[in-house]
Image: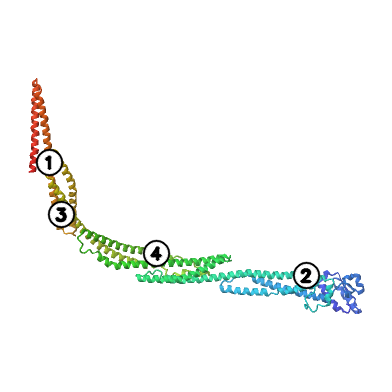
Amino acid sequence: MRGSTWSTVKPILKVLQEHCNALIHVAYIIKPDNFWQKQRTSLASHKYKFETCLIGLDALPKSIDTSQLTLDLDGSLIYDHAHWIEMRLALEDFLWQAADLLDRLDDLQEDLSRGDLADDLAGAKAALDLHNEMKKKILKAPVEEVDLVGQRLLQRLSGEGGPSGYDSGYSGRDSEASSGTTNPDLQACVPDILQHLEAGRTAQQQLLSLWAHKKARLDQCFQLRLFEQDCDKMLDWICRNREVFLSNYVEIGHSYQLAQQLQEEHNHFTANSMNAFININRVLGAASRLLETGHYAANRIRHVAGRLERAWKEFAAGLDERNAVLSLSVMFHHKAEQYVESTPAWSQACEVGNAPSDISELEAAIHSHQSLYEAMCQAYTEVHSTSKKLLYQLDHLVQVCNQPGMESDRKHGEGPSYEGSRGSGGGNPAADYSEGAGHVLNVIHQILNHHRALEQRWHSNKIKLHQRLALRLFQGDVKQVLDWLDNHGEVFLCKNTGIGRSLAKARVYQKSHEHFERVAQNTYTNAEKLLTAAEELAQTGECKADEIYSVARQLETRVASFAARVEERRHRLDLAVAFYQKDKEFCSWLDSLRQAVAAGEEEVAAETLEAAERLLEQGDQQREQTLAACNSTIAHGESLVQELR
């Protein structure tokens, strides 16, 4: 209290009393110079929890070692109160700046730690822009400035002094302080300063790392929303064009020209759709790349990409089915119109008119007539086969276009659906199919009526040609039979009139005649077939019955006459052979009988009556047998003579 009053000391003691009395054992008060102040201090200092002691400056070293007393208290402890205040203020200022920096960095970290992601592309773009501004804030945080302040403070505390011009209040007393022992109270703050410096740098690096991580996530969110927007655009395009497609997807045209026109329009529509296909492939490629990068919404990307891919496949399948239907429609109408256009020419070609008389020309006409029928049937088969394919393909198209399309996800915020797009064209599959199918069936019925009429006309003329040919063939066969009779049969009978003059010759003639009869039997059989055919031809009415019957009677008469003559000759030859056979047997009998008679004359006459009677009886039998054989031979000879006459 040298040079001071109680009013100066009292606040100090009050602060010690209020804040750190437990740490204080005794407070030494240097006796004031004024008596009244001394009395006042002595009376007022006893109310504190710690001891107070009024002491003179010269007695102070008795209680406190001089090494612990400052110079102004006649001690050796180096201490500059103004310097300590200055350094303490600098330290407090640094600690405040460091704490404020950490608070700001904590606020930024809290902002970066929010996991909210935008639900649309605009929000994702705004979030990216805001995030980029956040990086600027991180980089603008005074980490370097606070670090520089801290480094300068550490230099001053270490006794190395600060940079030139750093603090105008840093005077010679600082040099004096730095030349001796540094203040331990301030030195104890060095670890705290270092910790704050490290905390600031670490917090900024963590913020930058967290910013980069969130930047990657926001980029993925932006890419996801951009991908979803592209998918929605493609799905909207598919839905709009599907509605256009379904507006006439079952129209097949009622003529070749209309079918061609529809096909050209569909080809143009399909070609335009290929541009969308390129964009869809680009979007699906983007989905694959997002999945390859390990996107946080991989399942969502797969789901949306799968919906888009299924939607396009369904749309493309409808286009392909429609193309197949129109191709078959063009082919069907083209073949049907060709058939109808060819019908008059075919009908005229079916008429035979004046059929040729020559057999080869008739056969050529029949072949040509058959080729005409095959051409008509081929054309009809092509039309009918194409109609069946067209009906099947049309039914398949209706089924494909009326299958449940994309799932109804719009109400869940997942893009457009096909469910509402089928009302314009595919609401009633049966009605869609029946209109086109009814037209095809009507055309087929018309073609069938034409074909049946052509078949009937062709068949009647086919019968006429075949009957004409049968007549010519009949006449030719009759002529062949008659030619054989004239050139072979009659010649044989005329050349072979004899019966032979001996048994051997007669048998030669007989065998030759038997062979001739076997050959002639084929002619008889052919003649019988020809007579039967003549009856059938006469009954058809296509040929003149009188002409047929006249030729048939002529043939029958000639063959019957010839057969009778052949039979007569055979009978004569049989008689001749029989006569010569009888004659030969009779001569042989006579020879044997003569030999027996001659031998009997040389024998001795019978010795008894019975023996003589037996000989007589034997002689009578031989005579009767001889006469009978002779008469039989004569009868055969007379019969043969009668036949020859």
For marks 2 and 4 on the same chain, the one whose residue lies earlier in the sequence: 2
Indicate the amino acid at tag 4.
Gln
Residue designated by label 1? 500
Which secondary structure lies at badge 2?
Answer: helix
How many angstroms separate mark 4 from mark 3 (CA)?
62 Å
Q: Can residue 261 be seen?
A: yes
Lateral position of residue 509 relative to residue 153, left or right: left
Residue designated by label 3? 552
On the image, the x and y values in percent for residue 327 come to: 38, 67
Task: Estimate how packed mark 3 is, as few (under 14), some (14 to 19) or many (20 or more) residues with alpha carbons within 10 Å.
Answer: many
Q: Nearer the viewer, mark 2 or mark 3?
A: 3
For marks 2 and 3 on the same chain, the one whose residue lies earlier in the sequence: 2
Residue designated by label 4? 393
Indicate the amino acid at tag 1.
Gly
Q: Are marks 3 and 1 in contact (CB under 8 Å)?
A: no
Q: Can residue 401 be seen?
A: no
For marks 3 and 1 on the same chain, the one whose residue lies earlier in the sequence: 1
User: Looking at the figure, which quarter contains the C terminus?
Assistant: top left
Lateral position of residue 629 relative to residue 122, left or right: left
Q: Nearer the viewer, mark 4 or mark 3?
A: 3
How many angstroms separate mark 4 from mark 1 (CA)?
90 Å
On the image, the x and y values in percent for residue 135 come to: 65, 73
On the image, the x and y values in percent for residue 348 come to: 25, 66
On the image, the x and y values in percent for residue 236 come to: 49, 71
Residue designated by label 2? 190
How many numbered callouts? Answer: 4
